[in-house]
Image: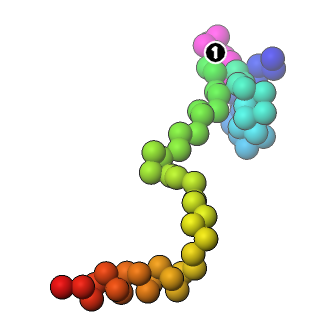
Amino acid sequence: MVVYTYSEARQNLASLLDQAAKEGEVRIRRKDGQVFVIRLQPRSDSPLDVKEVDLGISTDDIVKIVREGRERP
C-alpha cells in the first residue's frame, strides 16, 4: 500500500480518491507522523428503490384502469 504525504494528497486528490475506490483504501501521513486512512464508503441504496415489474400492460391500459376506477360511485 502506498502512503502519501499530505502535500501529495492535496495536489492529487482526484487520483487519490480513484485509487481508494480501486484498491480499497489509501493512507495519508502528516509531517507529525499522524496517518489517516481514506476508503470508499459502500453505497447504500434506498429501501424505496425497487426493480421494475413487467406486467405486460401499456401506459394507455393503466390510464384506462385508473379512469374507470374514478368513474365508479
Is residue 3 something one can see in this rendering? yes
**Hey, which residue is sitting farthest front in the picture?**
72
Which residue matches tag 1? 35
Q: Quadrant of the C terminus?
A: bottom left
Nearer-the-camera pick, 18 or 56: 56
Residue 62, how many percent across, how many down? 47, 79
* Magenta region includes residue 32: yes
In the rendered image, the vertical position of residue 46 relative to residue 19, given as above or below: below
Left or right: 43 with respect to 21?
left
Identify the element where label 1 is drawn: strand
* Chain part drawn in magenta: 28-35
What is the quadrant of residue 19 in the picture?
A: top right
What residue sits 81% from the left and 17% below the top?
A: 1
Magenta segment, prevailing SS (helix, strand or loop): loop
User: Which residue is at 65% across, 28% downward?
Assistant: 39
Answer left or right for 25 relative to 1.
left
